[in-house]
Image: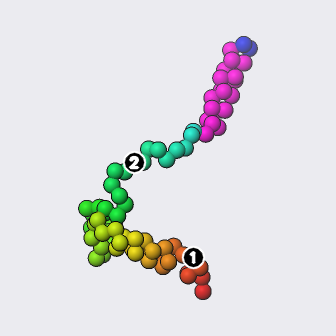
Amino acid sequence: MRSTFILSVAAAALALTACAEREQTGGSIKSDVAPYAGTTKQPPFMAVGWKPGDRNAWESQMKVRTVNGQNEYVKVP
């Protein structure tokens, strides 16, 4: 009887620990390189005609993506 009680308490404690939420922080992602520095990968990961390190071209490309690709109001007929 006592071992059943201890076992049920241990099972309940184990079940409740599964409900705990871990702390979520963005501190694990670190980059020493500016985003406009680019990558060595060719398309599809890099826009055609864009050269890594060109900040002005990168900013204009981000504006184009925001207007054309991520603006839901443009997509609605």
Left or right of 68? Residue 32 is: left
- Alpha-carbon distance for marks 1 and 2? 30 Å
User: Image quadrant for the C terminus?
Assistant: bottom right
Which is the main secondary structure of the residues drawn in magenta?
Answer: helix
Vertical relation: 38 (above or below) 73: above
Residue 27: percent from left, percent from top: 47, 44
Q: Which mark is residue 30?
A: 2
Residue 67: percent from left, percent from top: 50, 77
Instruction: Report the magenta residues as a range.
Output: 3-21
Q: Which amino acid does label 2 sit on?
A: Lys
Query: Can see residue 43?
Result: no
Image-quadrant location for residue 7: top right
Q: Is mark 1 on a helix, strand or loop?
A: helix
Residue 33: percent from left, percent from top: 33, 55
Q: Name the residue under label 1.
A: 72
The residue mark sitting in front, 1 or 2, is 2
Left or right of 64? Residue 12 is: right
Q: Is mark 2 on a helix, strand or loop?
A: loop
